[in-house]
């Protein structure tokens, strides 16, 4: 399975919205800067393991779920 940054970006956005967070709130909770979150959601950047872990923790989900490896 290859990494599809557009698909992962849509998953990140969906998980964020499901939690009721805007990008700024997710940035505060994860310590990942808002512009970085925006670039992930837009599918213009690939997230590294450190930021993926921070975002998954803030969203209370697994890395597999964030990376679209499970539904």
Image (cartoon, rainbow, N blue to C red):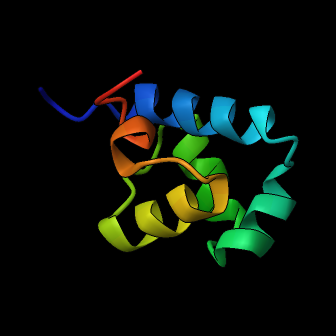
Compare residues 2 and 60 and report the one nearer the observer: 60
Res. 29 image quadrant: bottom right
> What's the residue at 38%, 74% (across, down)?
50
Image position of 57 (left or right of 35): left
Q: Quadrant of the C terminus?
A: top left
Residue at x 68% of width, y 62% of height: 35
Snapshot quadrant of residue 66: top left
- Residue most extreme to the top: 71
Question: Image point 43% across, 66% down: which residue?
Answer: 53
**Residue that lies at the very extreme toward the bottom in this rendered image:** 31
Q: State the quadrant of the N terminus.
A: top left
Number of callouts: 0
Residue 38 on image: x %, y %: 66, 50
Pick the front one: 18 or 23: 18
At x 47%, y 43%, the residue is: 44
**Residue 7 or residue 44, whichever sits in front:** 7
Residue 58 position, x and y percent, is 65, 62
Vertical placement of residue 69 versus 71, above or below: below
Question: In the picture shown, does residue 59 fall above or below 29?
Answer: above
Decide if residue 3 is on the left or right side of residue 67: left
Query: Which x, y percent locates residue 56?
Result: 52, 56
Residue 41: image quadrant is: top right
């Amino acid at each position: 399975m290859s990494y599809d940054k557009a698909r992962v970006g849509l998953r990140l956005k969906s998980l964020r919205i499901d939690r009721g967070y805007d990008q700024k709130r997710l940035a505060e909770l994860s310590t990942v800067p808002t512009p970085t979150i925006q670039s992930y959601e837009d599918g213009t950047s690939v997230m590294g393991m450190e930021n993926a872990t921070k975002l998954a923790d803030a969203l209370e989900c697994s890395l597999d779920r964030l990376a679209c490896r499970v539904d």
